[in-house]
Image: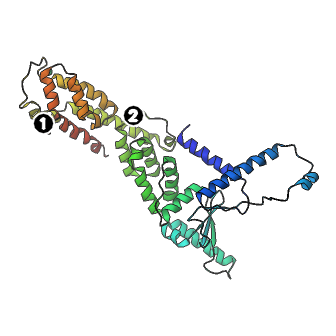
Amino acid sequence: MSTRASTRRKRALADSDEEVIVDDIHYRTTQNAQLVARFAGSLASRAQAARAQPQPDPKRARRSRSPSVVFIGIRRVAPAPFNDGAADLVIKTAAETEFMVYRSILAAASPVLANRIATAAERAAAEAPQAAPGSRLQIDLPESDFVLETLLRFIYPIPDPVLPDLDDIADVYDAAANRYSVACAVSALKTALASPRFLDVEPVRIYALAKRFGIDDLASIATRATLRQPAEWADYEEFQNMSAQDYHALLSTHRRIARDAVACLSSDAVLRTAATALFRGAPYRGKCPEDQQCWFTKFKECGQKVLLETPTSDRVCSPGFVAQLATEVQCERCRDVFLRSLLPGSYVEKLKAAIDALPAKYGL
Ligand SMILES: [Zn+2]
């Protein structure tokens, strides 16, 4: 099961628990919310067990009914700081949770919300002209509790929320950028999407999201990050929102850069400029059967395999990779040259510069 599917299931479970909640239970903190959810869950299972019983005669049922607890409705109030009784606006979510917030803070952060608030105020004034101008308004937004709360946490002058899940970031970004124009949230979420915790692990998902939301600079950064992984990607859910053209562009860029990186191994520009540092002053120990080329034959053969999969300089130009290959070369003369290739201004440094310049060639 994908992460997204599990998140959805968690939310679906939470939603089903919301069905039975005792009137007058207002939860104000996360801990309280969890207690209420547990309580509501046990009530829900009791109600389910009761429903499974054969239906009794309605008259008898009325007589035997316990008068002690009567469930008459649901009122869900958001956690702090969105439960302020003095607030002048109530936002009701799709789950009918009430977020009590201040109009001025929301209106400053989102032109869309500013517009909704103004319309609601006009309507309220028309319906009840005698009401005080600052009296509490209500607007309904078809958002999940999670999306609205996260958006409000970006808008309010409190620390920004940290979202560990890429699906959640995508949901909130969609709302912030495409439905409510909340610039502060858009900017913070873009930074989160470009952070190494996502980019290093799932660059293809970031690329797909960048394309879906039209964030060109993030798409370029993500394309570069995909070069550190083989182009054998899982069937990510994000591909459903990506065009075949974008998928093809990513794949072909990966392949072209891989082909160019392999060409860099034996390019004149790299080899010729590195030759002085490679051979000058190298002690002649033993004879080379390949005219001092066996080090290069080995490097090319092994480097090519790595670069075709992951066309970056990260591995092929690492001292560990070069030193390991050097130990596998029989020719003593070439082992010296191999190790000299790691010196400043020598082959490895030139090769690294050439490979690192490739993404720019493709506009990345
Ligand atoms: Zn040799």
Q: Residues within 10 Å of mark 2 (few under 14, many from 20)?
A: some
User: Viewer-proximal residue, 65 or 151?
Assistant: 65
Q: Is residue 76 left or right of residue 148?
A: right
The image quarter containing residue 139 is bottom right
In the structure shown, which secondary structural element does the residue marked by tag 1 occupy?
Answer: helix
Instruction: Examine the rendered structure and indicate whether residue 176 appears above or below residue 57.
Output: below
Residue at the disc numbered 2: 231
Kind of residue indicated by mark 2: Ala
Name the residue rendered at 13%, 21% in the picture: 332
Please identify the residue farthest to the bottom as the structure is shown.
Answer: 130
Instruction: Examine the rendered structure and indicate whether residue 84 appears above or below residue 273.
Output: below
Q: According to the image, what is the colour scheme of the structure?
A: rainbow
Residue at the disc numbered 1: 273
In the structure shown, which secondary structural element does the residue marked by tag 2 occupy?
Answer: loop
Name the residue rendered at 92%, 55% in the picture: 63
The image quarter containing residue 73 is bottom right
View quadrant of ligand 1: top left
Kind of residue indicated by mark 1: Thr
Can you give x and y, in whole percent of width and height, for residue 273 in the image? 12, 36
Can you give x and y, in whole percent of width and height, for residue 302 in the image? 27, 26
Instruction: Examine the rendered structure and indicate whether residue 235 appears above or below residue 132.
Output: above
User: Viewer-proximal residue, 196 or 31?
Assistant: 31
Can you give x and y, in whole percent of width and height, for residue 210 in the image? 43, 49
- The answer to whether residue 180 is visible is no
Label 1 near label 2: C-beta < 8 Å? no
